[in-house]
Image (cartoon, grey):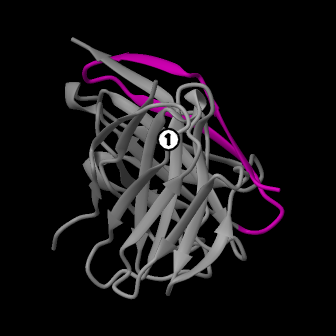
Amino acid sequence: AQSVTQLGSHVSVSEGALVLLRCNYSSSVPPYLFWYVQYPNQGLQLLLKYTSAATLVKGINGFEAEFKKSETSFHLTKPSAHMSDAAEYFCAVSGSGGYNKLIFGAGTRLAVHP
Amino acid sequence: KAGVTQTPRYLIKTRGQQVTLSCSPISGHRSVSWYQQTPGQGLQFLFEYFSETQRNKGNFPGRFSGRQFSNSRSEMNVSTLELGDSALYLCASSLASGTGDYEQYFGPGTRLTVT
């Protein structure tokens, strides 16, 4: 069975500081991993995805994530936070045979203060 | 290219009623998935349709059903509504299905409130 754990339901950073959102996964098959962002009263927007082509994945808005199989992690980072990054972030996993079924973590709400 | 559209955006229903939500995928996309988002349970997969066939189903009661039309548009229906069905229902479309690595694009959701 597949599952995702996001450590920290709330993360607060200063504008310009490093953003680190943690995600650990569990999967019995090679996973496909995704990070999504959700702004208030909106749907989910795909930030980036890992599909085994490269362990360091670059996404939109300056975000990137590194797949570490030994740690079963896929943490999301951004070198310098902007006020506009304040939102909720979700890590998700899918796997071969599961078609397009995404299993999401509980989400991490990112606050950015001046 | 237009994104995923969902109608209606907001809906208020009474316990015991039924409701139908609609989703129009991105042009050319053939897979549509539905998710329920609540504060308590988070984002949960409901079901996926591809080429008018249900490919996968989440752990929801039979009151939740869906279908997909030949133009890939999809509807989901919830019968005998319960208070716990109050949620944001999200639809996602994808080019295809099968390997799990296709990018899914989400609509803005339908906010259902059951009173």
Residue B91 visible to an observer of this rendering: yes
Question: Residue A58: in sight, yes or no?
Answer: no
Please tell me whether residue A93 is drawn above or below residue A82 in the rendered image.
below
Subunit that carries the residue with mark 1: B
| Residue A97 rendering spot, x and y as whole percentages | 72, 76
Give the quadrant of residue B27: bottom left
The x and y percentages for residue A40 are 29, 31
Q: Give the quadrant of residue A5.
A: top right
The residue nearer to you, when weighing B111 against A46, is B111
**Residue sitting farthest toward the front:** B16
Disc 1, SS = loop
Indicate the quadrant where residue B4 lies: bottom left
Q: Is residue A41 above or below residue B52?
A: above
Kind of residue indicated by mark 1: Gln
Q: Residues within 10 Å of mark 1 (few under 14, many from 20)?
A: few
Q: Residue at x 44, y 46 (%)?
A: B89
Task: Read off the magenta span.
Answer: A1-30
Q: Quadrant of the N terminus of chain A?
A: bottom right
Position of residue A24 measured from the top left corner of the image (x, y, whole percent): 68, 42
Q: Is residue A18 above or below residue A71?
A: above
Q: Position of residue B97 (x, y in %)?
A: 55, 80
The single residue placed furthest to the left in the displayed view is B1
Residue at coordinates 56% horizontally, 37% vertically from top-left? B16
- Left or right of residue B23: residue B50: right
On whether residue A12 falls in the magenta region, the answer is yes
Q: Is residue B64 left or right of residue A60?
A: right
- Give the camera-side residue of B10 and B32: B10
Residue on which disc 1 sits: B17
The main secondary structure of the magenta stretch is: strand
Q: Nearer the viewer, residue A91 or B66?
A: B66
